[in-house]
């Protein structure tokens, strides 16, 4: 389907011939000043903080978002599942990525918006550091760090989204899986690129080697985000960035926000490097299973190619990321080793939440996407 077509409440998205995926969208939330900026965006606010942030990002008029964010952070029981705060943070990062033309470019470094970002980031980082289990530190050598990261990623024995996709998922569930993935994968690799100028020597060369593949090695049609956009179109979904923001839960936004926070804050350099290492190390086999499942459900090569590509690419990337990127960084900067492990653990934890959310919803016979009752 064409860009921008999935805006209406309860509208159903035509999928492949035999099925439809139901994508129920949230209702508009007007800003404190009363104007509904949703007309300028493919998604809606989810509470007072996100409404105030969106209003300033679009209209440029300062709003009370920092005060509102302070109050919301204090009142939030679980910031990783907080729709209003995760959407506000997603929007603030989207301003830096340039993800939405409606966000005014001159506001990227607005002190008020940055203050709000810091309020939410501080609480989000504190929550991640509290909930994530980080293993004991290995010696700061490339080999020992790579081994420790492979041990962390190999120890994941929880229920597997990829195995479910391969063997049991229905066509609707496969569409939901693709919808959930659009939030990050249509911008694949961008969060980790923020780290490039902050690295030197071996880790810099290693990151650029990985990112060069992610960005197609000079071929625009091979850019991984473009391969994924093709998969989204091939499955009958909308590949316009942001088309499904309203459909995904806070945990899905939190997954991208985790990497954006690590990438955009220089003090978290170790964490974004560890995040990429864990991401690459948990990619090759799941992608083989995703492709298997999608083919089982009748999807064609246009949809499966993105997943096929990652089976081999990430078997290479995980070696580079483990030893030459994370391992070499730990050798050069032993002070960052703790954050390298934290970033890896956060990647596994946050993405496990997303997978678990989908599996839990499906095991109850429900959709993993936001429904009308969550408006
Ligand atoms: Fe990729
Ligand atoms: Fe990769």
Image (cartoon, rainbow, N blue to C red):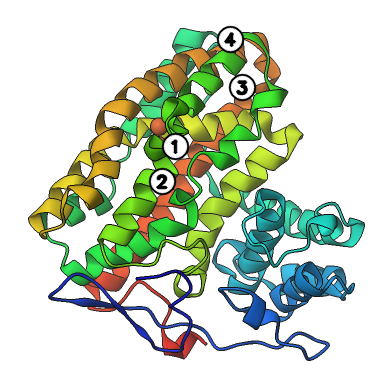
Q: Which residue is mark 4?
A: 202
Residue 305 on image: x %, y %: 24, 43
Q: Residues within 10 Å of mark 3 (few under 14, many from 20)?
A: many
Residue 358 on image: x %, y %: 33, 64
At mark 3, the secondary structure is: helix
Q: Which residue is mark 3?
A: 337
**Mark 4 → mark 2, Cα distance in angstroms:** 28 Å
In the displayed structure, 75 sits above or below 144; it is: below
Q: Nearer the viewer, mark 3 or mark 2?
A: 2
Q: Nearer the viewer, mark 3 or mark 4?
A: 4
Instruction: Compare marks 4 and 2 and give the one earlier in the sequence.
Output: 4
C-beta proximity under 8 Å, tags 2 and 1: yes
Instruction: Compare marks 1 and 4 and give the one earlier in the sequence.
Output: 4
Instruction: Compare marks 3 and 4 and give the one earlier in the sequence.
Output: 4
Residue 276 on image: x %, y %: 50, 33
Q: Which residue is mark 1?
A: 220
The answer to which of 345 and 14 lies nearer the viewer is 14
Quarter in which the N terminus is drawn: bottom left
Q: Is mark 1 within 8 Å of ligand 1?
A: no
**Residue located 12% across and 75% down the image:** 18
In the displayed structure, 69 sits above or below 209; it is: below
At mark 4, the secondary structure is: helix
- Residue 233: image quadrant is bottom left
C-beta proximity under 8 Å, tags 1 and 4: no
The answer to which of 113 and 20 lies nearer the viewer is 20
Find residue 226 and name its label. 2
Instruction: Compare marks 1 and 3 and give the one earlier in the sequence.
Output: 1
Q: Which quadrant of the frame does ligand 2 lie within?
A: top left
Query: Left of 245 or right of it: where is 196?
Result: right
């Amino acid at each position: 389907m064409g860009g921008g077509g999935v805006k209406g409440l309860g509208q159903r998205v035509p999928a492949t011939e035999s099925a439809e995926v139901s994508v129920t969208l949230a209702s508009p939330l007007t800003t404190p000043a009363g104007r509904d900026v949703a007309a300028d965006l493919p998604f809606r606010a989810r509470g007072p903080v996100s409404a105030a942030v969106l209003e300033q990002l679009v209209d440029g008029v300062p709003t009370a978002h920092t005060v509102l964010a302070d109050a919301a952070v204090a009142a939030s029981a679980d910031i990783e599942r907080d729709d209003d705060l995760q959407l506000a943070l997603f929007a603030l990062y989207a301003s830096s990525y340039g993800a939405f033309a409606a966000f005014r470019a001159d506001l990227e470094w607005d002190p008020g918006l940055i203050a709000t970002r810091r309020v939410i980031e501080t609480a989000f980082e504190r929550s991640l550091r509290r909930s994530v289990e980080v293993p004991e530190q290995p010696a700061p050598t490339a080999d020992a760090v790579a081994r420790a990261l492979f041990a962390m990623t190999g120890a994941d024995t929880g229920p597997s989204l990829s195995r479910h996709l391969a063997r049991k998922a229905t066509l609707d569930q496969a569409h939901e899986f693709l919808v959930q993935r659009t939030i990050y994968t249509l911008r694949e690799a961008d969060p980790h690129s923020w780290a490039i100028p902050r690295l030197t020597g071996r880790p810099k060369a290693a990151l650029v080697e990985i990112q060069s593949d992610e960005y197609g090695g000079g071929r625009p049609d091979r850019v991984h985000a473009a391969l994924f956009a093709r998969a989204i179109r091939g499955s009958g979904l909308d590949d316009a960035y942001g088309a499904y923001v309203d459909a995904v839960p806070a945990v899905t936004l939190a997954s991208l926000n985790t990497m954006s926070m690590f990438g955009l804050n220089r003090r978290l350099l170790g964490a974004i490097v560890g995040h990429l290492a864990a991401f690459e190390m948990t990619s090759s086999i799941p992608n083989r299973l995703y492709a298997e499942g999608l083919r089982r459900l009748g999807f064609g090569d246009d949809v499966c190619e993105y997943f096929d590509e990652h089976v081999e690419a990430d078997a290479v990337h995980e070696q580079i990321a483990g030893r030459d990127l994370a391992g070499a960084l730990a050798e050069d900067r032993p002070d960052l080793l703790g954050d390298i492990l934290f970033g890896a653990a956060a990647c596994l934890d946050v993405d496990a939440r997303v997978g678990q959310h989908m599996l839990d919803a499906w095991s109850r016979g429900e959709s993993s996407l936001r429904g009308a009752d969550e408006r």
